[in-house]
Image (cartoon, rainbow, N blue to C red):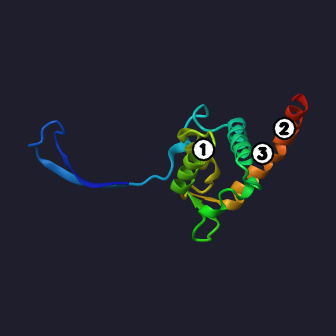
Amino acid sequence: RIEGTYTIRRNLADPASQVSGTLNLSVFWRDADMYLPEGIRMSDLEFQAVLGRMARRLKIGGIIPVERAFDKLDSGGEGVLRRQDFMTALARMGLGVSQNEGARLFSRMDGDSDDMIRLCRLRSELALCAAVDAPQRAQEKWAH
């Protein structure tokens, strides 16, 4: 948030020039990620890849079902996960997700830009990734 009252002068380069008015300014923004060019936003493919990586690491860590991995972070029982809690959890869980990926992943799932994601959305996305990844895991198991 940026707020302030600014003096407008007849000659902007001369602070001693005659005052011609004031400007009250208040700017607030939520998340600029949705306005970024396609190359910077998280594509569908990257979204699935990052969630798939998270799901695999959760399973390797013995967290099953993976869809429930973030439930305990909902301390208020509201069914939501706040951005800071999500980012802290990613770092502590060692899921192989960079801060940049985590921030873009969160922004992608935060549909209304209120800095919260619904746990039901995260659960369904993780479950979908686990299901989509099943044929790959079967092939990897067969190859070993």
Q: CA distance from mark 1 to mark 2?
A: 21 Å
Tell me what residue is drawn at x 73 percent, y 41 percent.
52
Q: Secondary structure at mark 2?
A: helix
Dot 1 surroundings within 10 Å: few (below 14), some, or many (20 or more)?
few
Q: Earlier in the sequence, mark 1 or mark 2?
A: 1
Question: Which residue, given by chain and number where applicable, does mark 1 sit on?
Answer: 94
Which residue is pictured at 71% across the width and 39% down the height?
A: 44
Label 3 belongs to which residue? Answer: 129
Q: Which mark is residue 137?
A: 2
* 3D distance between C-alphas at marks 3 and 1: 18 Å
Taking depth in this image into account, of 33 and 97 the one nearest to the observer is 97
Q: Nearer the viewer, residue 141 or 19?
A: 141
Q: Are marks 1 and 2 in contact (CB under 8 Å)?
A: no
Mark found first going from the N terminus, 3 or 2: 3
- Please name the residue shown 63% across and 47% down the image: 108
Expressed as whole percent of the image width and height from the top left, the position of residue 64 reads 76, 54
